[in-house]
Amino acid sequence: MEAENRISKAKKRLVALVLLYTGIAFVLIGVVVFKAFSEKKKEASESGKEVIDLSGPASEEKAEEGQYAMLEIAELPKAMLPAVQNAGMFYYVTDVNSHIYIANLSNETMKGIIDTLDTETGKLKSAYRFQGIICKITEPIKKMAISNSVKVFGNNKMNLDNFAEYLDEFYIKESITKKGSAVSKRTATLYTCLVLCGVFFLVVAFGHILPGIIKLNKGEFGIMDEKAMWQALQKYLPEGETLEAGICGIGLQTNVRQAFGKCVLAGKRLLADENGTTLRVSKSKYARFGVYIGITWNYLILSECETYKHYYEFDDVLEPEGGAVKEIDTELRLEDIGTCFPLAEIQSCEFKKLWTEAVRCSITMKDGSFLKLRLPKQGGLGMPNHTKYREALIERLRTGSADNR
């Protein structure tokens, strides 16, 4: 009943996470879709408006605030300094009819104009056309234009009273939205990041969490499955022994050294042979790996959760140091070596509690074998008895190894 409650609560948490992550993804992607749609709609609306050519005949009579306008310039624009705060860079521009306007241009546009400059004549190689919107000149812009008027008019006679004699009461602000580019590069980058974040949340929700919910419904827990653990440990259980506890732990370091009498090595197996020698096998692994750890009254049983590679060494010996020589009935697979250890052969067993509240167990056997295992604080949903079994395993290792000292 307790296990069912844990699984039910876990399902509810996972479902809540799927809904949360999906909601976040839809919001992020939805914002981008809405903005892109708005920009497209705005662009379509703007493209339908009349665009007057200020360089054409009698065009200034049609100039109204908010009107879209086009202008052809033949000379390099002259900057008006200092720039108006939060309003971009303003320039004096002279069109092909030698009429002077004030224009607000981007750095990108200025670069394009400069690229058409003829350094020998100081003129543009060809007329440069740009499009913008007509805006009313404000007092700050007007004062800046007056302070810089000597650049284009060659005198200091312009003032607020006679401003209209020199310049129009409007300026051309270059359009931010351009044909073929609905948003700026910075905005496009932001949209891309939002979409990628949304996709990430969708991948987590439907690629990781949802499959987990499906597995829970089917009763599939991967290696964190108590039934699978019992089956794996039973394979190495000595006759007459009964498993008292078992957990899914982590192997940190193993160096198993066991001797086998009257045998020969044949590929990945040891074969019984009356004319064979005593062979000492060293089986080592110095990396993390999943392992089921079981305990009986007399034995420590290990069974790897998956197939892992190990390093092997083989030596012919006359009298192995420490530990008894084991006999082989017919054959023994190398992968089955180092799966069963008598508690009576434990020379030392040390426990250290880690900051994660896991317990690290270091075991040295009389034959020189060494095991370093990590016993996690908690098991998965498929391991409802993990805490109880871990305590029983630690207690039996403590008492079993203490009996040998």
Image: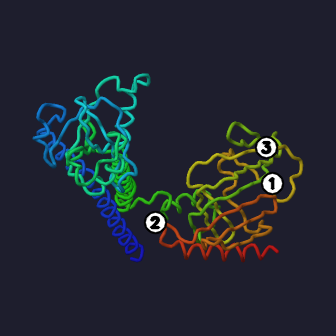
Q: Characterize the local packing of mark 1: few (<14), some (14-19) or many (20 or more) Cα atoms within 10 angstroms.
A: some
Observer-nearest of 176 and 87: 87
- Residue 261 horizontal/vertical position (percent): 80, 48
Q: Quadrant of the C terminus?
A: bottom right
Residue at which label 2 appears: 382
Residue 321 against residue 74 in the figure, above or below? below
x, y percent for residue 134? 19, 46
Residue type indicated by callout 3? Phe
Near mark 2 (Cα within 10 A), the count class, few <14, some 14-19 or many ≥20, is: many
Provide the secondary structure element on which disc 2 rests.
loop
* Quarter of the figure with the N terminus: bottom left
Q: Quadrant of residue 345?
A: bottom right
Q: Residue 25 lies in what quarter of the image?
A: bottom left
**Residue 196 in the image, given as x and y percentages of width and height:** 37, 49
- Residue at which label 1 appears: 325
Q: Work out whether mark 3 precedes mark 1 in sequence or the reverse, and give the earlier one.
A: 3
| Residues at marks 3 and 1, CA–CA distance in whole angstroms | 15 Å
**Could you say which is closer to the camera, residue 364 or residue 194?**
194
Kindly state the secondary structure of the residue where label 3 is placed: strand
Q: Is residue 8 left or right of residue 346?
A: left
From the viewer's perspective, is the residue at label 3 or at label 1 nearer? 3
Numbered mark located on residue 264 in the image: none
